[in-house]
Image (cartoon, rainbow, N blue to C red):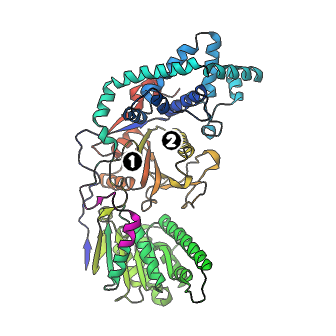
Amino acid sequence: MEITSTVTPQPFAAEAPFQPTLIIKNLAQVQELAALERMLATIYGSAKPVSLAEILEKVQCDSLTISLLKHLAFAPICTGLLDGLKQSLTITDEGKRLFEISQILFGFHGQVSVSSRFSSNSGVGSNTTIAVKLKLSPAEVKQSTIRLKARLQAPNVRNLVEQIVRQQLAIFKSSGLCQAMLLQQNSFVASGPVTGEWTVSSKVSAESEIPRQVEKVLSALTKTNTINIIGGTGTGKTAIASEVALALAQAGKKVLLVTHSRLLAAQLRYQHQQYLAELEQKEQHHFSPMQSTTAAQAGCALTISTFHALCHSAAQTANLNPPKSISTRVFNEIFPELLIEATNLYRDLKFDAIVVDEGHSFGASLWRALMHCLKDQVNGEFVFCYDPQLLVFNRLSIVPHAATTIELKTSLKPNIDLLASNESTELYEVSTADEQAETVQFVVDNLLDGGKYHPNDIAILSANNEKSHRFKFANGVKVCQQPVKAKSKAILETSLFQFRALTAKVVILIDLFDEVEKLSDWKFQYFCYLVWGRATDKLIIVGSEEAMARLLPREVATLATAEILPSNGRKQ
């Protein structure tokens, strides 16, 4: 008996009373803000950039208004402050020359290279750059920068900064934009969960829920041998699948944990190796002659593989010469037949128990071939985990019948399937690949410089299948196409589709151009479902305004910071 999914995806919440608005930023504006904050650091004698938020606090601005301005990249304050400083500091020819030097020194108008933006010297332009651009000798540059620093650090300049900020703040608070944003301030926190199968709970943690569900599955396996585990994105299916497979292996069974994604399989293998290493270290520390070799047993008894890698390996073992060409027919028809034939020839290739993750990606021919890999096809244990919403997007959306079905109804990720806020979602408009690369490099360097995130917390995901963009990050940070080890100086870069079963604290989605706009409706629904489930902390989207507008739910409006002060958002 076979069943099919009838769940219709409903990835977004109903319309809110006030339409949520996400702010679209652009690199030119963010660079100007960073340059201004470097100038403020010199004015206030700080070793690191002084943020406009700190200056606003100095003039006793309320926290809500600061939050609104932060979402707007401080555009309503930034331009007015810079113009006010320029007017006051360029009265004489000497003042004009010193201010021109400051533009290069602090990196205004994108004059600071990516590699130096967030270096230990705060990313300022070099004396050599100043000398070349202004045709000055090294001695003249040195004397000029000394005079510039002395002028900027005069107490009256600090007073001037705070006076201008107060003026600009008053203008902003009386504006229609500020009033509109205050009306929808509730939209800056995630809206409610989807009206569908799964709810989001902040009271249930993964640390408590995953072990409880694993015990539930293991208990059910003592009474029946086939279980379907059903749950939406973020409900813990992968964690439960891996823990169940490990528990069965530790019980002395030969277990296969199989998935459809190479990236996920590699990640699961790495996590398993880490677990075995930690377990072995504990066993050595607490050694006893009577102690069982738990780590060795679990390591030898558990195989983690993608379906197609399993078929290829089995066919080679059985000398069946797997085809070298790759096609849909090879994957969905020939490989399953090779697996069945290989396991018939070599019984050692069969398993006591099989746990399937990403079951929604397995057509009927694939999971039937897997069932044939059980040593005991009547009583062998078969656990099948899948997302019924993703079954809708799979034309081969048939799942096996199981004696027991366990539904996971609580999402363990508070931002899954929710409308993210301007705190957790950032939009950057770009029009070319070069502008995209520069924006991504700037954003990543900024994230890492803040100290909250490490390179392995970040994943750069392409909306198409491009794999390398030759990004150049500061401080020796590289990109790779395989799961990143903890504490390494590498950032994972892959496609959104390859990353479909994984998550990262920060996801940067790129390549949102014409290809995305041309996707059919059902493919685009699938695309959106993947996008909104990958980040656990922050989602950063880089692309064309049209593509980003289509990606966002209809309940969400967008406002480009370039539209607030158009001249400030343009490239110089």
The quarter in which the N terminus is drawn is bottom left
113 vs 462, nearest the viewer = 113
Residue 338 in sight from this viewpoint: no
Q: Residues within 10 Å of mark 2 (few under 14, many from 20)?
A: many
Find the magenta span and give its range. 194-212
Does 17 appear above or below 328?
A: above
* Mark 1 / mark 2, whichever is N-terminal: 2
The amino acid at mark 1 is Val
The amino acid at mark 2 is Gln
Find disc 1 in the rendering and name its residue.
Answer: 516
Residue 384 in sight from this viewpoint: yes
Residue 498 highlighted magenta (yes or no): no
Residue 200 highlighted magenta (yes or no): yes
Residue drawn at the location 51% of the way across and 33% of the way down: 51
Residue 136 at x, y percent in the picture: 73, 20
Is 554 positioned to the left or the right of 262 in the image? left
Find disc 2 in the rendering and name its residue.
Answer: 436
Among the 4 quarters of the image, the one containing residue 402: bottom left
Residue 333 at x, y percent in the picture: 40, 75
Disc marking residue 401: none
Is 357 positioned to the left or the right of 135 in the image? left
Residue 231 at x, y percent in the picture: 32, 66
348 vs 478, nearest the viewer = 478
354 vs 319, nearest the viewer = 354
Q: Are marks 1 and 2 in contact (CB under 8 Å)?
A: no
